[in-house]
Every structure is written in structure tokens, then in C-alpha cells.
Image: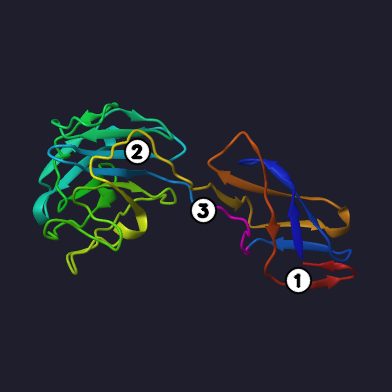
Amino acid sequence: MKCRASSMNRLGRSVHARCREGVRALTLVFSCALAAAASAQATDLIISEYVEGSGNNKYIELYNGTAGNINLGNYQLHLYSNGSPTVSTSTALSGMLPSGATIVYKNASATIYGGAATSAPAVGFNGDDAIALYKISTTSYVDIFGNIGCDPGSQWTSASNRTQDRTLVRNANICAGVTVDPGNAPCDFPTLESQWTEYAQNDVSHLGSHTMTCGPTVNFAAASSSALENAGTATVTLNINPASGSAETVYVTIVGGTATYGGGNDYT
């Protein structure tokens, strides 16, 4: 049986599902898949750009792709130099970062970017150094660039990208950071190829903004719902996070389940 859900307002508003079958009472158990579910919304900060420029022209950009403001005082930037397994330099962050905004940190001697940037001792890396964004409240990483405790020589490389003398921008479809260090063997940077796009050395044209195309999550508000099929219209409530004021259309398809005959025209 297929149910088509009409236009709805996001987060907590009802959708109307029109279901066509015989004239029976049917309980819909929503253990099925949601056919049009979107990709997950970001839940924390990510490292959105890495600039390993000439001389001291080093920059790191962070992006808030979540639905709310983030207190940067809960985070630190950690630099792991030359394969060190322990933090070489740490920078405590501060301020509030609004939803959809970026913040740029720079080496104190960097000069090639004219936009707003905050000096940070941890932005003193070269192409063979790992960088991590650490969350104080959870005592955990929310993103890792490179491989902590591993020295690749002069740089990490992949089929298309390298970390020395290059600008790397996080791909728009990346919604979450690397939270688990890759480990020392084989000393690689597993997501360098799949999550980053490379630009020329000293290209700072992308700093100050970032694009993330991650959509909201869509879930049923209740585990089950029942309605008479001959009623014409039934109401099913969905939750969409994050909320939006705009109207959306959601299509719901029942892809599994069973119906138990209860007597007469009644099925459960």
C-alpha cells in the first residue's frame, strides 16, 4: 500500500496521507523505511578549509553547519607537529559562531588573506602536520585533518590532492568531521581524496564562506497510527530537524509489514 503525503510545514505539523486499498480498518506500523529521507544535518563544527601557503601564510577555517549558534569556548585547536602523538601547540577558541557561519584562524605572520581572521598559535603547521578540533565538554575530537602521531615525510598525498603547498576545501556533501584518528599504520590520510578539493598554493578566494548541502532528518513522530481506509484522508505526523518556516512536500511509501485479519472488514 502506498500513502502520498501532501504539503506540510516542517517540524511537528501534520501531513495528510491518502491511502488507496480496500475498505478496511488498517493499523500502519511505521517500522518501514521513509522513501524520501534526507541526509543528516550537521551536528557539530567541521574544519572546512586548510591553506598551506608560502612562508607563514597558513589558515584554518571552521564552519558551523548546525541549526544553532555554537559557543567556541568549548573548543580548542590542536597542532601535532612532525608525527608527534601528543599536542605540540594548543589554541583555546572563544566567541559565538552563528549557524551557517565560518571563522578563519591564521598564523600570526600570515598576510595574503584580507578578510577577518584571528591569530592562533596552533596555525603553525606544514604539510606533514596533523590538526585536530577538540571539544572540551565531551573530551573528544570533532574533526581531524591528517593523521595524529604519524609523519608522512613532507606531506600526505592522494590521487588528486596533497597537503603541502596547497589549499584544500571541504566538499559540500561532508556533514560531519573525522572523529577517530586513522592510526599510525599505514600512516595515511584516508579521507584526503574523498572529502577535499584541492586548489593552488596561496589560493585564499574560498576563505570566509563555506557551502554545505546536507539536508534535514525526517522521522515519524509515532511508532504506529491507525485509520479507516474509506475515510479518504488520514493524518500522519512527521518531525523534521532542523525546522524551517517554508512549506515542503514529503512522500511516504510503506515498503513492508503485515496485516492481520480481525473479522469483518477489519485488519490490523
Magenta segment: 31-39
Q: Residues within 10 Å of mark 3 (few under 14, many from 20)?
A: some
Q: Is residue 121 above or below residue 266?
A: above
In front here: 96 or 233?
96
- Identify the mark nearer the N-term, 2 or 1: 2
In front here: 213 or 135?
213
> In the structure shown, which secondary structural element does the residue marked by tag 3 occupy?
loop
> In the structure shown, which secondary structural element does the residue marked by tag 2 occupy?
loop
- Identify the mark nearer the N-term, 3 or 1: 3
Chief SS of the magenta region: loop
On the question of residue 115 being in view, the answer is yes
In the image, taking residue 119 as reference, residue 31 lies left or right, namely right
According to the picture, the residue beneath numbered tag 2 turns out to be 206
In the image, taking residue 78 as reference, residue 265 lies left or right, namely right
Q: How is the image coloured?
A: rainbow
According to the picture, the residue beneath numbered tag 3 turns out to be 39
Q: Residue at 62% across / 56% down in the picture?
A: 36
